[in-house]
Amino acid sequence: MQNPLYLHPSDGPHTGTISEKLTKPSNYRAWRRDMEIVLTSKRKLRFVTGVVKRDPEDAKKQDQWDTCNSMVIAWLTGSMSQNVKESVIYVKKAKEIWDQLERRFSFTNGTTKYKLNKAVHDLIQKDKSVLEYYTKINALRDEIDAMRNLPPITTMTPEVLAFVKALNKEREEERLFQFLSGLEEDYAAERSHVLMFSPLPIVEDACARFSHEEAQRELHKEDKVMVETRAMLSKKEEWCSVCDMKGHSKERCWKVIGDWMRVASLPNQKLNL
């Protein structure tokens, strides 16, 4: 059903709520994104953006709109803490609640953007795996992108298309450079190799390349440990027939080597082995 005024029989006041409730400005951006996903999945996002308006004449559509609007309000308020809920409980339109929350909590956007950008700038791989490091920096970048308030493009001309393509390329390169700059110095050679590519790879491909390199290094490390362990075990299994002790052969026994060195050091002595 594509009709935005349609509600599924299973929809109820609690079917569109999210587990993490809106409590304060620090979790507003994540809460808003989660609500956008839920409302989009139920084709009700346009109620909070104001695209779907109440029909001024058709009584049947008015009734359907009122029902959907009330359901969206229930989903919104059901995903808020009690304090936040009490501040919007008497607002009659879902869009007004949405806009009011944006005005109330978006004043911290400047601080949040600064903190996010600083976190991206300061983030390094350190003791994290390549994939863990990529996941962290990518989450920060996605949150920054979600806070961008860019105007929509209504007419796509060849010039606008070329500009958007160039802009997206610049953003992809920025993501790549941020990812590469935080990698451990052990990957310096591989990083230089990636930067020689033309065109440059997207950050996801770079992550896959470094993850493969990391896996190869771990494999070599395990092989080295295995070889050293086998050498130690082999050494322990050796037995000397001269001193009747384990851990070395008779050719490397100190009694043999010690006597040989003592005799060889005496003048005019012939060594009989």
Image: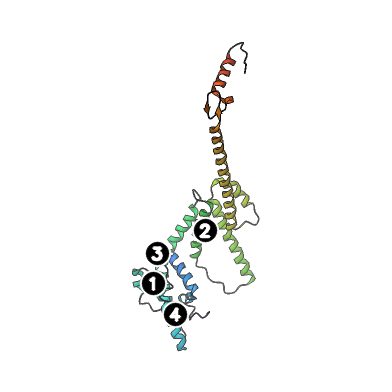
Against 36, residue 134 (above or below) is above
Q: Nearer the viewer, residue 54 or 163?
A: 54
Tag nearer the camera, 3 or 1: 1
**Horizontal and vertical percent position of residue 186:** 56, 45
Q: Which residue is mark 1?
A: 78
Q: Position of residue 61 (x, y in %)?
A: 47, 86
Q: Residues within 10 Å of mark 3 (few under 14, many from 20)?
A: some
Q: Mark 1–mark 4 contact, CB under 8 Å?
A: no
In the image, what residue type sits under mark 1?
Gly
Up the image or down, 161 lies above or below 117; here it is below
First reached walking from the N terminus: tag 2 or tag 4: 4
Mark whose residue sits in front, 3 or 2:
2
Spatial CA distance of label 3 from label 1 is 17 Å
20 or 33: which is nearer to us? 20
> Which residue has dot 2 on it?
138
Tell me the residue that label 3 is attached to: 25
In the foreground, 61 or 7:
7
> Which comes before the other along the chain, label 1 or label 4?
4
Label number found at residue 68:
4
- What residue is rendered at 43% in x and 81% in y? 67
Question: Considering only vertical position in the picture, is 217 above or below 75?
Answer: above
Q: Which quarter of the figure has residue 22? A: bottom left
Q: Quadrant of residue 92?
A: bottom left
Please name the amino acid that badge 2 sits on.
Asn
Give the mark nearest the N terminus, 4 or 3: 3
Q: Which of the two labelled residues, at mark 3 and mark 2, occupies the earlier sequence position?
A: 3
Distance between the alpha carbons at the discs numbered 2 and 4: 36 Å
Secondary element at tag 2: helix
Q: Residue furthest right?
A: 198
